[in-house]
């Protein structure tokens, strides 16, 4: 399968040390099956940090997701477990060391609901209720270890 990474610079090789902490699934390298989503991320990063939008393609043998010695976590949809995982990672609390995580992106609309949950404006039940009405769910792949990154081939 082809995965896309949106950035404000060309990715010649993946350097996990350049990854930022407090992201949805932790500190790691993020990709999407959606070229459109990666392009939007590249545009956002270039506006925020300078540079030009760049989308880098990678080949990934997704068979490793089903038959692997890697530590893999899959979230098929928004759920309480997903919310707890994202919330913990965004707070800087390592929610579990995984080689690869696949699940929904916590976009701006979801981020707003996470902030409301965090500041006590809504409780977890209301948070999960609001997630049911979110449209256009987009999924992401997280590669959090050097072992996992070896399964990506730059195209």
Image: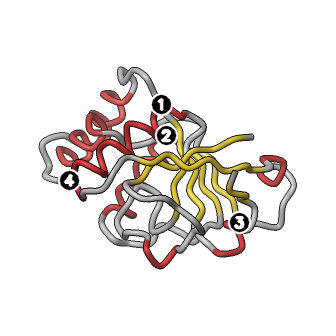
- Residue labelled with disc 4: 118
At 38% across and 72% down in the image, what residue appears? 93
x, y (%) of residue 133? 35, 20
Tell me whether circle 4 and circle 1 mark residues in contact (CB < 8 Å): no
For numbered disc 1, what is the local secondary structure?
A: helix
Q: Earlier in the sequence, mark 4 or mark 1?
A: 1
Q: Nearer the viewer, mark 4 or mark 3?
A: 3
Tell me whether circle 4 and circle 2 mark residues in contact (CB < 8 Å): no
Tell me whether circle 1 and circle 2 mark residues in contact (CB < 8 Å): no
For numbered disc 2, what is the local secondary structure?
A: strand
Tell me whether circle 4 and circle 3 mark residues in contact (CB < 8 Å): no
Measure the C-alpha gap from mark 2 to mark 3. Answer: 18 Å
Q: Nearer the viewer, residue 108 or 155?
A: 155
Q: Earlier in the sequence, mark 1 or mark 3?
A: 1
Disc number placed over residue 36 in the picture, else none: 1
Q: Would you place residue 18 above or below residue 110 in this image?
A: below
- Residue labelled with disc 2: 104
Quarter occupied by the N terminus:
top right
Instruction: Report whether 2 appears left or right of 94.
Output: right
Q: Nearer the viewer, residue 55 or 151?
A: 55
Classify 10 Å Cα crowding around label 4: few (below 14), some (14-19), many (20 and above): some
Give the farthest residue toward the right.
67
x, y (%) of residue 32? 55, 42
Disc number placed over residue 13 in the picture, else none: none
Q: Earlier in the sequence, mark 1 or mark 2?
A: 1
Instruction: Report whether 96 appears left or right of 48.
Output: right
Disc number placed over residue 71 in the picture, else none: 3
């Amino acid at each position: 399968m082809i995965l896309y990474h949106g950035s404000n610079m060309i990715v010649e090789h993946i350097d996990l040390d350049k990854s930022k902490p407090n992201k949805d699934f932790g500190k790691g390298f993020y990709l999407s099956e959606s070229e459109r989503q990666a392009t939007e991320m590249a545009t956002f990063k270039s506006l925020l940090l300078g540079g030009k939008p760049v989308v880098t393609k990678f080949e990934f043998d997704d068979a490793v997701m089903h038959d692997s010695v890697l530590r893999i976590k899959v979230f098929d949809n928004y759920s309480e477990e997903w919310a707890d995982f994202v919330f913990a990672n965004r707070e800087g609390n390592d929610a579990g060391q995984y080689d690869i995580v696949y699940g929904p992106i916590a976009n701006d609309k979801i981020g707003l609901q996470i902030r409301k949950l965090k500041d006590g404006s809504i409780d977890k039940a209301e948070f999960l209720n609001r997630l049911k009405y979110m449209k256009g769910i987009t999924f992401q792949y997280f590669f959090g270890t050097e072992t996992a990154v070896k399964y990506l081939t730059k195209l």
